[in-house]
Image (tube, grey):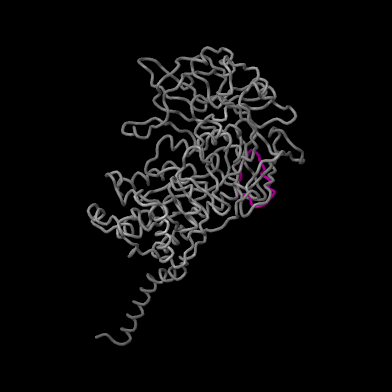
Amino acid sequence: MVTKRQFFSILLMFAAIFTLFQGPQVIRQDRNRYAQNTHLTGTALNEHTVWQASENSRYAVYLGASGASTRKTAEEWAFYTKRSLRTQQRLSEYRLSENRLPDLVMIDATALTYPCDTSAIRRILDLGVPVVLMNLPSAAQVAEDEELQSLLDIYYIRKDTVHADGIHLYKGLLLGGERIYQAKEGEETLQDLALDVPWYVPSAGSRTFISAIITPEGNEKLENKDMPSLLWRVQREQSMLYVVSGSFMSDQLIGIGLLDGIMSDCSEYGIYPVVNAQNLVISGLPVLSDENDETMRKIYGRSQTDFEKNVILPAIESLCRTTGNLPTAMAAAGYDYTDGGSPSGNPLTFYLRQLREENGEAGVCLLHNGTADAQTAAQETFTALNALSDGYTYGAVQIASSDLSEAGTLLDDAGGSGIRTVLTDYSAGRPVLSWIDESRTLQPLFSDAASHTFRTDLELLGVQTALAYSTTGINLLQTLWPENTDDQWEKMSEKAFSNLETWWKPFRAFARTTLSESDARVRTALSVDYQDTLVDADGAEARDFAFGGQTIRLAAGSFEGTAYFILRLHGQEVTGITGGTCEKIEDGAWLLAIHDSQAEIIVGEEGMS
């Protein structure tokens, strides 16, 4: 028989166990202000806040036809690095002012005449100005032009065209280290780089940064120096010439990174503003209506709502804890919008609570399958989200590229006037980072995490080098409306998770952000201006790091919050910093977080402890 004292003891024990296991959850639920979007910050963008070139701005020169494929790359690079860009269509028409020299001269093949008068390029180099040949004329033209071959320091031309087995990116220009883009057996779908290349072999005095990979025939032996060079540096007495063979500079994402790498390589140091944001976007988490419930039950034996809540969401949470990513989950009312289904039963507040636990953010997904128009998708989605979100403020929206031209009106009419950033698929020719109006930035979705290829990886390295920025996505609409077995969750998630844990690994120093956090950083990067000066221990301007004890003085002007920069050195280390903090990205590269308008970076032989 249990006495009263024993019964009371048992009761206390159960109360203690209940408190031990349920107490933290109760407290967490009470403190989880899920209806508040804490990621929304940032200033307005307009002609007064976005950086504008002036007469005193540092500048670069682009020579080439107005429609040349490399021109957009030059324009984008100059804007992000806060340089004005002076242009001329023909090299023969360009007159270099010796009073104020450019930082860099970029020459497209369309600016040249053949046979090439190389004396104009040599004069630019003799004045100490680095030159980039953004691409080359045909191999036949190069083979017939001995003067051009001499300028390019080509030792010999083995073949006009050869089909390579892959591309070898050496360490030096792009952040992320060495890459070998050669598909192994079973990886053929990864290879999407152009592999038909001319076989130029520069002299031993040149340095190759990118080469093609050729498998030797028979007993032939080929060393790295014998491979076709695709990007190499020619050392001249006063400056450096960079030669690009191929279309790398025609791809903006690759080209802007290569230009930053080249500018740092030919200078005592390189410093330039970046965004510092790594975004992971989950499209269709959640979908509020069970439009495709029959198919989901047939494949998975679960309802669409149950599958997203109890299978997909826990997997996404686990991925983010492993990689450090902060999820931006883009909620949608549907995808079809024509079947008469209405948002119901999907516990949106549950998702908001879970996202808050992961320090993530909820956004709005306006993607649709094409049978409905964008206005219907926007109206239904904003109506549903505003009714079910307990007052949550949405700051980010995902929209199809085909609907982008009407995005501002679409959002305002549908009840999305509070949206501060718009996400859409990146397309060539469009600026990497820009804005729709002074209240909304435009951010690009570069890739689908489940379909990473060699080209998308090279583009990733380029944009990470140039802007410390990346946005990749996991498209659940593809999984919830599968067209084949590759779209189903098991296969798609395996590829996506593996890619995120592998290809993004070199960039752990960059901040994991939500889209609204990224929006604030984009606004700062687009508006910040800066000047940098190298001074010696006595405060006098220095030309190089020859005697040690030098300091880089960085004047970043006025900005809100923190401005981020990448600093690249050649063998030296950052030994101290005032006005901010720094973190090493890799050998020779640091991420600077600048808090004050004036900062100093102390450079020496031993790094910070």
Q: Residue at x 65, y 52 (%)?
A: 559
Q: Nearer the viewer, residue 456 or 401?
A: 401
- Could you tell me if residue 609 is visible in this image? no
Q: Looking at this view, is 460 or 428 the one in front?
A: 428
From the viewer's perspective, tell me whether residue 536 is left or right of residue 496.
right
Residue 403: x and y in percent read 44, 48
Determine which quarter of the picture holds residue 266: top right
Where residue 8 sits, quadrant-wise, is bottom left
Against 288, residue 591 (above or below) is above
Residue 434 makes an appearance in the image? yes
Estimate the x, y position of residue 23 in percent, counting from the top left.
41, 72
Q: Residue 509, percent across and down?
A: 52, 46
Residue 39: give x, y in percent of width and height: 52, 58
Looking at this view, is 481 or 299 the one in front? Answer: 481
61 or 258, which is in the foreground? 61
Indicate the quadrant containing the N terminus: top left, top right, bottom left or bottom right.
bottom left
Let me know if residue 333 is in the magenta part: no
Determine the residue positioned at 35% across, 44% down. Answer: 495
The residue at 48%/30% (across/down) is: 169
Q: How many marks?
A: 0
Q: Residue at x 47, y 21 (%)?
A: 228
User: Magenta segment, which residues?
Assistant: 593-609
Note whether 525 is above or below 69 in the view shown: below
Q: Is 186 on the left or on the right of 125, as rendered?
A: left
